[in-house]
Image (cartoon, rainbow, N blue to C red):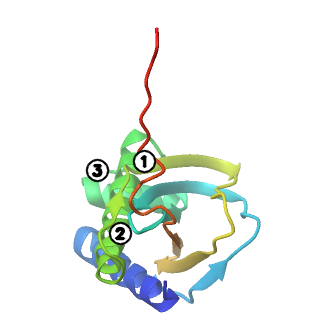
Amino acid sequence: MDQDVIVKAAEAATTEVFTTMLNLQAVPEASHLEQGSPEVVDGIVALIGLAGPWIGTGVINCSPDLACQISSTMLMAEYEAVNADVLDAVAEIANMIVGNVKTTLEEHVGPLGLSVPTVVYGRNFFVKSVGPQSWTVVPFRIGSELLTVKLCLAQNQDPHGTRAKRTYSLQC
């Protein structure tokens, strides 16, 4: 998959979501590829799986402060600490961003499905996908905060699910 297509899709999706949903400016910074060992993460990570002719994961990462700012704007309430509402708001923003990226990528690779977002909050943890694939990393500056959009995509070696179509019989 062409990295420029992924970067442009991530930039367009993120800036659109932040402009229309939050009235905030998300300024893209220099994108890069990430390989090898995962970095230690502090903050909030939302993960969404993609499946179809291409498979992979979309990840949104931000600080607790940015998550609270996003939630306060989105939910029209004041959030100063991470709670279930903040995690839900970050999951929804991730769903919108990765969903918009998916729609753009479908023009190049065919239909894709999305999983339900999973959100992790903590300090000093790793997020890693199994396999040798590289991640396309697109950081955004939102005020003084940083939001990172990461996408890891690989061509599906079994796009029709033939390995999953097995017949099992139970004998009692």
Q: Residue furthest top?
A: 172
Give the residue drawn at x 49%, y 80%.
141
**Residue 146 drawn at (x, y percent):** 54, 73
Give the residue drawn at x 47%, y 63%.
66
Q: Indicate whether 63 appears above or below 171.
A: below
Element type where label 2 sits in the image: helix
Question: Disc 3 vs disc 1: Cβ atoms closer than 8 Å?
Answer: no
Element type where label 1 sits in the image: helix
Q: Nearer the viewer, mark 3 or mark 1?
A: 1
- Number of numbered discs overlaid on the protein picture: 3
Give the amino acid at mark 2: Ile
Give the amino acid at mark 3: Ala
Q: Nearer the viewer, residue 91 or 167?
A: 167
Alpha-carbon span between mark 1 and mark 2? 15 Å
Query: Which label was assigned to residue 97?
Result: 2
Looking at the image, tell me whether mark 3 or mark 1 is earlier in sequence order. Answer: 3
**Residue 147 drawn at (x, y percent):** 50, 71
Query: Which label was assigned to residue 87?
Result: 1
Q: Nearer the viewer, residue 22 or 116?
A: 116
Give the amino acid at mark 1: Leu
Element type where label 3 sits in the image: loop
Q: Which residue is mark 3?
A: 77
* Lateral position of residue 49 relative to residue 73, left or right: right
Give the residue drawn at x 30%, y 61%.
73
**Residue 157 drawn at (x, y percent):** 52, 65
Give the residue drawn at x 53%, y 56%.
45
Alpha-carbon span between mark 3 and mark 1? 14 Å
Q: Residue furthest right?
A: 37
Alpha-carbon span between mark 3 and mark 2? 22 Å
Q: Indicate whether 12 appears above or below 36.
A: below
**Residue 10 drawn at (x, y percent):** 41, 79
